[in-house]
């Protein structure tokens, strides 16, 4: 890609590419418009293409015994142009080249966020993805993780809860009923009427306190109650430290490959079987794999890397298969466990 771009491990949900025929029409209109009116290229679209495919194993360090493998696990990414750097030649290329897609700008860059804020969001998503990958991998290695509540990472400004809660608080009980994970908090909240009070027991530093907050309507699930906070499971110190350096890659969908690379690093056996393995997919701390987007571009990146196996969320399996131009094997998975078992079967 020639336009200024950012490397993302994902394309946001709903960012459906413009159909190839329509993309050609848009390019044609822009060409005529520029020729007749000498006007600038409209910043209504962005171009998505294949991005870097780094070896995840080389980005991970663990303060414990680790084991080398003959093969490798590669993150796949999509390069997304910045709207204000898009040029007419980029639009023309996206209209004709299979590796590129033309996508409405607002589906990739939320209109309420600046370029800097979007970059910050992508970095935050990557950090959360790494944390989830570590937890998922360690649990698959049989390491028991201790948790003690839902850690608040963000409080929305102006909601009733903002008067009582702050980032760093750990919710340990709801209406007197103990919780130890983020997922245990959700059912207590969504079953309340919007505007109803909810009593939370929180830990702030060394102090414990109880607060009553009023629920609001969820912005993501209309008609359902929410508190106006972002939380994650509060995991007690791990038996050893795992660090990941993702360089300038943002977004959440390197999670599956990170988790596999961590698992392989801690496993005396070689999960790669000497193969070049690539893939994409979000991951939860419990090892559930989620859909991502930009699958076609990631397939192309994997092919250029020389991957022989590509792991993809089960919901996007058909899309991935349709994008493959060589004999690379595509495996659809719903969990980290499925991915591990599939790779072991094919390496026997």
Image: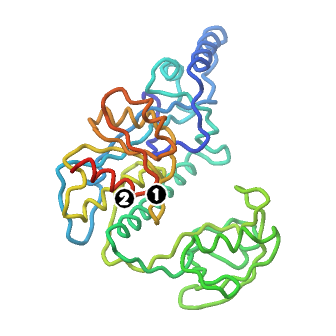
Q: How far apart are marks 2 and 1 (CA)?
A: 8 Å
Question: Which residue lies at the image location 51% right of the left edge and 41% below the top edge?
Answer: 293
Q: Name the residue under label 1.
A: 283
Secondary structure beneath dot 2 equals helix
Query: Which quadrant would residue 84 be assigned to in this image?
Result: top right
Q: How many marks?
A: 2
Secondary structure beneath dot 1 equals strand
Q: Which colour scheme is used?
A: rainbow
| For marks 2 and 1 on the same chain, the one whose residue lies earlier in the sequence | 2
Question: Which residue lies at the image location 65% right of the left edge and 8% below the top edge?
Answer: 36
Q: Residues within 10 Å of mark 2 (few under 14, many from 20)?
A: many
Q: Mark 2 points at which residue?
A: 259
Q: Which mark is residue 264?
A: none
- Name the foreground residue: 127 vs 293: 293
Residue 159 left/right relative to 7? right
Q: How crowded is mark 1: few (under 14 residues within 10 Å), some or many (20 or more)?
A: many
- Name the foreground residue: 84 vs 310: 310
Give the percent coordinates (x, y) of residue 231: 58, 69
Considering only vertical position in the picture, is 313 above or below 260? above
- Name the foreground residue: 206 vs 233: 233
Question: Which residue lies at the image location 38% right of the left edge and 70% below the top edge?
Answer: 139
Query: Which quadrant would residue 192 be assigned to in this image?
Result: bottom right
Considering only vertical position in the picture, is 54 above or below 177? above
Give the percent coordinates (x, y) of residue 122: 51, 51
Residue 183 left/right relative to 132? right
* Residue contact at pointers 2 and 1, CB within 8 angstroms: yes
- Name the foreground residue: 305 vs 87: 305
Considering only vertical position in the picture, is 306 above or below 74? above
Give the percent coordinates (x, y) of residue 75: 36, 46
Give the percent coordinates (x, y) of residue 211: 71, 84
- Assign the N terminus to one quadrant of the image: top left
């Amino acid at each position: 890609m020639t336009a200024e771009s950012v490397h993302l491990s994902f394309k946001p949900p709903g960012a459906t590419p413009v159909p190839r025929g329509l993309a050609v029409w848009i390019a044609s209109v822009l060409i005529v418009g520029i020729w007749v009116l000498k006007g600038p290229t409209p910043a209504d679209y962005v171009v998505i293409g294949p991005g870097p495919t780094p070896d995840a194993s080389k980005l991970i360090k663990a303060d414990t015994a680790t084991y080398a493998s003959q093969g490798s696990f590669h993150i796949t990414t999509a390069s997304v142009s910045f709207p204000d750097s898009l040029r007419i030649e980029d639009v023309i290329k996206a209209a004709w080249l299979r590796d590129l897609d033309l996508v409405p700008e607002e589906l990739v860059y939320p209109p309420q966020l600046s370029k800097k804020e979007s970059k910050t969001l992508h970095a935050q998503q990557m950090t959360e993805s790494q944390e989830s990958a570590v937890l998922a991998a360690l649990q698959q290695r049989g390491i028991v993780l201790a948790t003690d509540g839902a850690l608040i990472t963000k409080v929305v400004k102006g909601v009733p809860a903002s008067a009582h809660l702050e980032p760093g608080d750990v919710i340990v009980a709801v209406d007197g009923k103990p919780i130890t994970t983020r997922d245990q908090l959700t059912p207590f909240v969504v079953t309340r009427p919007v505007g109803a009070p909810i009593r939370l027991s929180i830990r702030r530093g060394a102090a414990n306190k109880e607060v009553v907050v009023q629920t609001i309507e969820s912005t993501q699930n209309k008609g359902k109650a929410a508190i106006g906070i972002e939380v994650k499971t509060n995991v007690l110190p791990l038996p050893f430290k795992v660090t990941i350096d993702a360089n300038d890659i943002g977004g959440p969908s390197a999670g599956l490959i990170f988790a596999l690379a961590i698992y392989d690093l801690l496993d005396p056996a070689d999960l790669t079987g000497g193969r070049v393995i690539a893939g994409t997919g979000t991951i939860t701390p419990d090892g559930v794999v989620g859909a991502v987007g930009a699958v076609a571009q990631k397939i192309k990146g994997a092919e250029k890397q020389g991957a022989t196996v590509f792991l993809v969320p089960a919901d996007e399996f058909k899309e991935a298969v349709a994008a493959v131009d060589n004999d690379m094997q595509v495996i659809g998975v719903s969990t980290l466990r499925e991915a591990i078992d599939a790779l072991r079967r094919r390496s026997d």
